[in-house]
Amino acid sequence: MTSTLAPATGTTPTARGPRGLPLLGNLPAFARDPLAFFCRLRDEYGDWVPWALGPRKAVFASRPEDVGELMAQVEISFSPAELGWAFRHVLGDGVVTSTGPDWRRKRALVQPSVRPRQVRSYAATMVECADATASGWSDGRAVDVAQEMTALTQRIAVRTLFGVETAGREQVIADAMAVAQQEIGAEFRGVTVFLPPWIPTRGRRRLRTAVATLDSEIERIIAEHHEAAADGRERDDLLSRLLAARDESGQPLSERELRDECITLYIGGHETTSTTLAWAWHLLSGSPGARARLDAELATVLEGRLPTFDDYARLPFTQAIVKESLRLYPPIWLITAVARPGATIGGRPVAEGTTVWTSQWSVHRDPRLFPAPDAFRPERWDEDAADPIPDHAWFPFGGGQRTCLGTRFALVEAALVLAVLAQRWRVETEPGEIKPFPGLTLQPSRPIRAVLRAGAAS
Ligand code: HEM
């Protein structure tokens, strides 16, 4: 399917952008409210907009075709953008932070552990953890939905990564990961991102302590996995699969590489999925029609039992709720890449060193691509929907060379968690708009307060 937008206009020497300040360029407007800034670029200047982030030249792309081309060209004629000291300090040289041949090798080593076939074996853990949450909830209790979803997806992440045997250490790992994520997010949006790594801010000290805890916990868990493998004890978790992986020359991941990939998969997968679920509950709570259709689907397909991996395919409306939530609140809200010599997009030359930006937020809410773009309408994902979704108009998982390795994992997890909880509970969130806060992921800017009500039917 192609986009309904006007075609690219060749080399567009006349592309216009917002006027910037000397030295700072458009940095103040961007930093004040990046989501509004991107929508303004799209609405006022068009689909290919030059702007400047401080001294760095940038272009903002909005056409799905250009987005697709950009993502396909990363690691070819574009370099992935640098993610900052904090990110690297936590994730080390895992698949997200590596580039070039090193990235290619790691991607090939990690990919088999998150293949759709493997996700089947993680699904039972997802359902078990969600069922435990459902059993722990009580009628009339007030909760912060984001916190509830964080606790649940943390448990799922630790258990699918390291196995249920880590249950005793789950909280220590989850707490250290939470500090690491918080500090990465703070640095991502704050001025410290511009400070050299040796300047010891309070946040950086907290981060170092959390990383030291993670390192020692993960070292111990890896040692236990080695022992289990040596004794021939089979384990069915992600780390065991990473341990068994071999590259083209028959080499396994080193201990340090294993540590980096474990943290990468945890950080990459957990907060993204928990925010998706938190937004989904809020959207569902404000949409009785969608909730009724969800209840009907769950009642017909599951008849009151817990879902299995095979049920995922039988729950298209549950899947649609997840997709629509990801459209409205994409956890990863921007993608950037820096042009190498000779780069082009849509036939336009992009000068070496220019950063091309695009944003899931603004593309997903483009009225030319999604009628009533701000409305929660899971039915737009129906197979026979009147307005088909154009290619690359929806890209919460990125695409092309570096597309998210956990796409299937995340989609299955979100749908199964919704299915388990919605069968037993209604989550009634306080009505009203909750503004998103664009940190490392797109978080709700305030707690999503809700009251839990037993029973699915209204
Ligand atoms: C709703 C949940 C998730 C969202 C929205 C999401 C989104 C993304 C995005 C946008 C990227 C960058 C893609 C690009 O640059 O084109 C990415 C990369 C990645 N994601 Fe996810 N992700 C999610 C869940 C997960 C899960 C559950 C895992 C692991 C189990 C995971 C592992 C990764 C990895 C390893 C990469 C790096 C791929 C590479 O650089 O080659 N993600 N994700």
Image (spheres, rainbow, N blue to C red):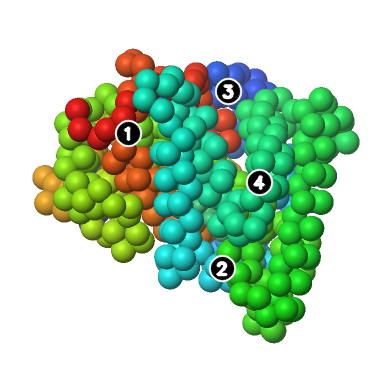
Q: What residue type is labelled 2?
A: Asp
From the viewer's perspective, is 259 left or right of 33? Answer: right
Q: Which of marks 1 and 2 is nearer the N terminus?
A: 2
Per the image, the residue denoted by label 2 is 236
Within-10-Å neighbours for mark 4: few <14, some 14–19, many 20+:
some
Label placed on residue 170: 4
Q: What residue type is labelled 1?
A: Trp
Element type where label 4 sits in the image: helix
Per the image, the residue denoted by label 1 is 425
Q: Which of marks 1 and 3 is nearer the N terminus?
A: 3
Per the image, the residue denoted by label 3 is 31
From the viewer's perspective, is 160 left or right of 68? Answer: right
Q: Nearer the viewer, mark 1 or mark 2?
A: 1
Residue sitting at x 69%, y 84%: 250
Q: Nearer the viewer, mark 4 or mark 3?
A: 4
Element type where label 2 sits in the image: loop
267 or 363: which is nearer to us? 267
How far is disc 4 from disc 3 in space, using C-alphas? 36 Å
